[in-house]
Image (tube, rainbow, N blue to C red):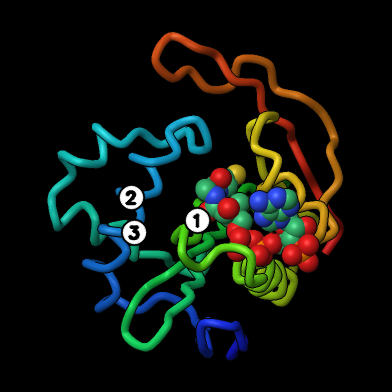
Amino acid sequence: MTLPTPQGEVILRPARMDDMPAFRVLRLQALRDHPEAFSADYQTHLTVDDANWGRYFNFGENAIIHFAFQGNNLVGMTGVRLDTSPKTKHNANIWGVYILPAWRGHGIARALVHACCDWARAKGALIARLGVTTTNQSALRCYESCGFQITGTDPKAILVDGKFYDEYLMAREL
Ligand SMILES: CC(C)(COP(=O)(O)OP(=O)(O)OC[C@H]1O[C@@H](n2cnc3c(N)ncnc32)[C@H](O)[C@@H]1OP(=O)(O)O)[C@@H](O)C(=O)NCCC(=O)NCCS
């Protein structure tokens, strides 16, 4: 799928194995620059070797990452994982939503979240879920614009530099 932006056309597509080096750079930037937005930890990921980064791409049938590219440059990502228990496999969990600063405000995150929701629906999922730090207004508004609603609050979900952050739990029917 292509998305026109004022900075040129952006291509949205599922991750491929050869995207791994670019994914590593983008993911580390996300974790380094927005520690309060992600439960994954920058320092921990910094020490992960190539083989283990490769494991993130062994999706099997239950997960996918959608990437946004401008030319050969990776500018954004969003992942989704389906639960695997027979009792919870109707749930799809959105994770890792990140757009490079220079590419924000053009609808790329919304398009990636929709792509993940479409994929999960096609896999039979009924509900998409995610967590967002209560102070992260841009992400909260983005998810609302994708049809997500706040379903609860997870207190002290994330601890960064001695400060706790609450998370809103959000969900939407697929
Ligand atoms: C949050 C983030 C992913 C949004 O990416 P984006 O591509 O700029 O978002 P979009 O352009 O798709 O915006 C979709 C909607 O979100 C809302 N939104 C996005 N950025 C916003 C901002 N800075 N202020 C207010 N609303 C905002 C708007 O409603 C927007 O729709 P509109 O432009 O039609 O009004 C991006 O800012 C980012 O990567 N932030 C750092 C990492 C992060 O917080 N990730 C989320 C973890 S839960």
* Spatial separation of the CA atoms under disc 3 and disc 1: 8 Å
Instruction: Identify the residue position indicated by label 3 in the image.
Output: 26
The spot of residue 4 in percent (x, y) is 62, 88
| Residues at circles 1 and 2 in contact by the CB criterion of under 8 Å | yes
Residue 138 in view: yes
Instruction: Identify the residue position indicated by label 2 in the image.
Output: 29
- Mark 3 secondary-structure assignment: helix
Position of residue 8 relative to residue 17, above or below, is below
| Residues at circles 2 and 3 in contact by the CB criterion of under 8 Å | yes
Position of residue 2 relative to residue 54, above or below, is below
In the shown orientation, is residue 35 left or right of residue 57? right
Seen from this angle, which residue lies furthest top? 162
Amino acid, disc 1: Tyr
Residue at 66% of width from left, 73% of height from top? 111
At label 3, counting other C-alpha atoms closer than 10 Å, the crowd grade (few under 14, some 14-19, many 20 or more) is: some
The spot of residue 48 in percent (x, y) is 18, 44
* Spatial separation of the CA atoms under disc 2 and disc 3: 5 Å
The spot of residue 119 in percent (x, y) is 65, 74
Mark count:
3
Q: Which one is earlier in the sequence, the residue at label 1 or at label 2?
A: 2
Amino acid, disc 3: Leu
The spot of residue 26 in percent (x, y) is 34, 59
| Residues at circles 3 and 1 in contact by the CB criterion of under 8 Å | yes
Residue at 13% of width from left, 49% of height from top? 49
Position of residue 151 relative to residue 127, above or below, is above
Give the label on residue 98, or none.
1
Q: Which one is earlier in the sequence, the residue at label 3 or at label 1?
A: 3
At label 2, counting other C-alpha atoms closer than 10 Å, the crowd grade (few under 14, some 14-19, many 20 or more) is: some
